[in-house]
Amino acid sequence: MTFHRGWFGLVFILTFAVAHTSVAETSLDAERISDIVGVPAETTPDGVVRVAWPRNDVPLRVDGLAVRAAMGLGTWAAFQAVPGAGAMVMGDTVVFEDEVNPALDAVLAGGLEVTAIHNHFLFDDPAVYFMHIGGRGDAEDLAAGVRRIWDAVRGVREQAPVPSSRFSGEVPTHGQLDTEALERIIGASGGLQDGVFKISIGRDAEIDGVAFRGSMGLTTWVAFAGSDELAAVDGDFAMTAHEVRPVLAALRGAGINVVALHNHMIGETPTFYFVHFWGKGPAANLARGLRSALDVQRDAQGPARASKPSQLTLDFEGPGAGSLPAGFSTALTGGGPPSSWETRADLSAPSGEKLLVQSSSDATSYRFPICVYEGWSAKDVEISVHFQPISGRVDQAAGLVWRYQDPDNYYVVRANALEDNVVLYKVERGRRSDLKPKGSWFGYGKAVEVPRGMWSVLRVRAQGSHFDVWLDDEHLFQVEDTTFSEPGRVGLWTKADSVTAFDDLSIKSIDAE
C-alpha cells in the first residue's frame, strides 16, 4: 500500500489537533480556582483540582482526645472537568452547630447542592458536623459558590470564636396549642399526645419488589410543642432526589433550621432522603412555613401528583436582618457592580416588621439586579408582591420575574415610578425587549400612576403563552409570547440605581387548562 507523505502530514496535524482539543476540554485552571476560593490548589495526576483547609480554629475533643485536622477534620472541595459541560464539584465542609444553617444558606444562594449533613464522630466536644456538597456548571461559578460557603462559616466564627450551645431566641414552654388551626394550615390531620401535636404524611416505595408505606417509617412528620404564641417544631421530610433542594430552600425561607440530611434505607425505589429540622416561633407561622415546604415538594413531584394549585407567601420575617433572606440567591443582568439585597427591620412593612430592600444605587443604565427564590420552579404561575419605590435618578423600578432560566433569559414585568407606567419584557440572551400588550400595535406597556414612597401591589398571571398584569386591583393588559415555554424560577427585579423595598412575595402554581 502506498501512503503519501502529504496525507501522513495531514493525519498527524489532525491527530495533534484532536488530542490538543481533548486536553483543553478536560483541563481546569487550578490557579484561577485557587484565586477565587482563596485557598491553595493542587492538581492530581488524573486532572482533578483540589482545594482544602484544616478546621483547627476550634479545639475539638473526641472521646477525650484532642483531634488534629489530619484525623478527618479538614474542609475540602474537588473540581473535575466535564467535556463540553464545564465542570463538576464535590466537597465536604466541616461545620459546628451554629455554622450549619449559615453554610446551607450560602450553598443555596451560590447555586450548589447539599447532598448530606451528618456527624462523623460520637462523643465530640463541641459537636461537629459535615456538610457534603455538589454541583455542575462553569468552573469559576462553582468556585465562587464554594468560596461563599466557606466565607459564611468563617463569618460565624469571626463573630463568636466559641460555637453556640443553642439556637438564638427564647425557649418555648409547654402549653396549649390550637391544633385545629395547625391542621387547617398544613392541610392534614394529626393527634395530640402528652401535649405534643404530631402530623404524619406517608410516602410509597418498594425494596426488591416489596411495597411499603408510612407505617414502615417512610413518612414526612412534624411535631409541635409549646404554645400558640411561642412553639417549637421538629420533624422529618421524606424526599426523592429532585425534591431535596426545593424543600431545603422553603424551610430556610421560613426561618426553620435544618439539622440533618441523610438516608434511612438502602436499596429502596425510588431512593428517599430525609431532612430533619427544628424551628421556633408562633405556632401558626411555623405551620405556614412547613406548608410552603410541603407545597414545593408536591410541585416537584410533577403534575401527576399535584391535584390542586399550591401557594406560599414569603414575608421576609426570618431571623436576623441585614442579609439575603434564606432560600434566595442574587444575580445581575447587564453590567455594573453586584446588587445588594438585604432584609431590614421596618414597622411600616405591609405585614410583620421586616421587608426586603435592593439598596445598591449604582447608576449603570443597563444593569438589572435580580433576587431569585430557589425553592420554586413552575411554568404556569401567579405571583404578586408589595413594593415601595424609595429612590433613584435613572430609574425607580420594581419587577416580578418568572420562568427564570439564568440571568440572561427570563420574563419580567416592572412598574416604574419615574415614568408612571408598567411594562412587560422578555430578556433573551441578555437583551431586554418590551412585549406589546394584546390589541396594541405601538403600545409600550400601560401608562398608570406608580406612587413614589408608597406601597403598591404588582401582580402577574402566567399561563401558557398568556400573561395578565395588574397594579393593585386594576387589570392593565395582557401579553402573548412563546419565547420561554419551560418551567423556571421566580424572583424580584430592579433597574440601575433603583432603591426599592419589597414585602409579601406571593407565589401560586396554576393547573394547566
Image: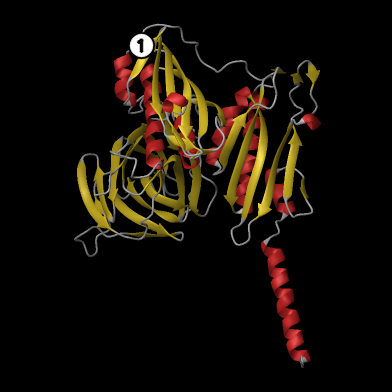
Circle 1 — which element? loop
User: What x and y, as percent, mark residue 34?
Assistant: 72, 47
Residue 309 visible in image: yes
x 75%, y 37%: residue: 53
Using the rendered view, name the quadrant where residue 442 is placed.
bottom left
Above or below, comparing residue 152 to residue 28 in the picture: above
Above or below, comparing residue 283 to residue 4 in the picture: above
Task: Report the quarter where the N terminus lies.
Answer: bottom right
Left or right position of 135 against 436:
right
User: What x and y, as percent, mark residue 147?
Assistant: 65, 41
Q: Nearer the viewer, residue 368 or 312?
A: 312
Q: Nearer the viewer, residue 293 or 152?
A: 293
Disc tally is 1
Q: Dot 1, how many residues are within 10 Å of its Cα: few (below 14), some (14-19), or many (20+)? A: many
User: What x and y, as percent, mark residue 70?
Assistant: 80, 32
x 69%, y 69%: residue: 21
Using the rendered view, name the quadrant where residue 64 is placed.
top right
Q: Nearer the viewer, residue 308 or 76?
A: 308
Above or below, comparing residue 14 to residue 170 in the picture: below
Name the kind of residue labelled 1 in the image. Answer: Leu
x 30%, y 18%: residue: 181
Residue marked by disc 1: 177
